[in-house]
Amino acid sequence: MASSNNKFTNFLINHKKEIKHILLCILGSFVLAFGTAVFLTPAKVVAGGISGIGIIINHYLESTIGFNIVDIVVWSFNIILFIISFIFLGKKFTIHTLIATFAFPAFLTLIMRTGMFNFIIEYFDVSDPRNDYYMALLLAGIFGGLFVGIGVALTFLGDGSTGGLDVLCFICYKYLHIKVSITSFLFDGVIIFASAFAIPEHVIPAFVGVLSALISAVVIEVMYVSTNNACIIDIITTHYKEIDDYIIKVLDRTSTIIDVEGSYTKKKYKMVRFVVDKRSLPEVRNQIAKIDQKAFVTVSSANLVLGEGFLPIRVKEKMKSKKK
């Protein structure tokens, strides 16, 4: 018995980092589902993503079917995109999105079907005549964006991905060489814009959806990007040209290429060094693995990065006025 306890303790110690990441991804998925099911869905606020598509589809089918199907739509799209990811992006990226792909819709179904938060949801249901429509709409957009942003940031901190439309963004990057940030913005923008036309009374909620998406982006910036400034990545590889091409064309950064030699094998290699914000680190790791699985990669935190694309090198002096 004592031996089993020791093995379990050793397992926890040896896999502490991985367990922490898994727990953060699960917690992030729950918070994301909470913001979607409790605030955005009852107020019909479309802030982009698969859940936004679910809200639009549910608007047309709920009266016919007789119940809310937002979570069913999310399940369907996530499973389809998970399979597409496996086919077009490979096993490594797909595993990277595994937890959130299934945890998010599972928590969404749990919250929506059990009624565990109905005492909050009832205040944001815009179809309830007892509620002030515009007040419920605005508050739902604010709090929905807040919780969605927290959920996504926690998932990123757990070195995970929320999956969903991110799969299409990475496919566009792989085959069309369009930056992930651009396609992500375009997809969410199209969904919000479509909601204004798909749902006749949804023009004002569409603006609230934009507000909600902005709040979410700010929260992610504060929780993830600002607390995880920049990192220095060194890659020793024989495929330095492909990696450097990815850094310049996709990340919109530049790099330094250094000649190195293995002390044991005496083989010549190239080391690619560049600086990137930590938000992009999961994407960078996946791409390096696709280009060269035998690459040797080291990542270190940078407390301060000065130069083009980051902070200016020179500090502006404050102008002092003297009165004579």
Image: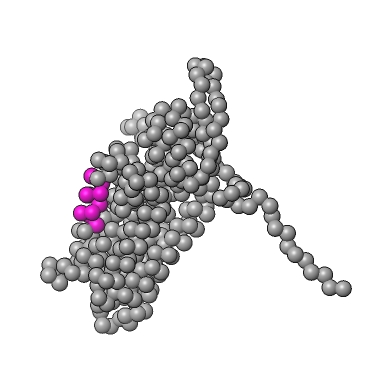
In the rendered image, the vertical position of residue 130 relative to residue 72, given as above or below: below
Kindly indicate the quadrant of the structure image that contains residue 38: bottom left
Q: Residue at x 43, y 65 (%)?
A: 215
Q: Is residue 291 visible?
A: yes
Q: Residue at x 47, y 37 (%)?
A: 244
Name the quarter where the C terminus is drawn.
bottom right
The magenta stretch spans residue 92: no
Identity of the residue furthest to the top in this view? 265
**Which residue is at the front of the view, 218 or 30?**
218
Q: Residue at x 51, y 38 (%)?
A: 233
Residue 91, given in percent of the width and then of the height, sits at 29, 37
Name the quarter where the N terminus is drawn.
top left
Q: Residue at x 37, y 61 (%)?
A: 148
Magenta highlight: main SS:
helix
Residue 29, given in percent of the width and then of the height, sits at 34, 54
Residue 23, given in percent of the width and then of the height, sits at 37, 48
Residue 113, given in percent of the width and then of the height, sits at 21, 63
What color scheme is it? one colour
Kindly indicate the quadrant of the structure image that contains residue 93: top left
How many numbered marks are there?
0
Identity of the residue furthest to the right in this view? 324
Lateral position of residue 312 relative to residue 90, left or right: right
In the rendered image, the vertical position of residue 230 relative to residue 324, given as above or below: above
Q: Is residue 117 visible?
A: no
The magenta stretch spans residue 75: yes
Magenta residues, as a range? 74-83
Kindly indicate the quadrant of the structure image that contains residue 322: bottom right
Identity of the residue furthest to the left in this view? 64
Lateral position of residue 129 relative to residue 278, left or right: left
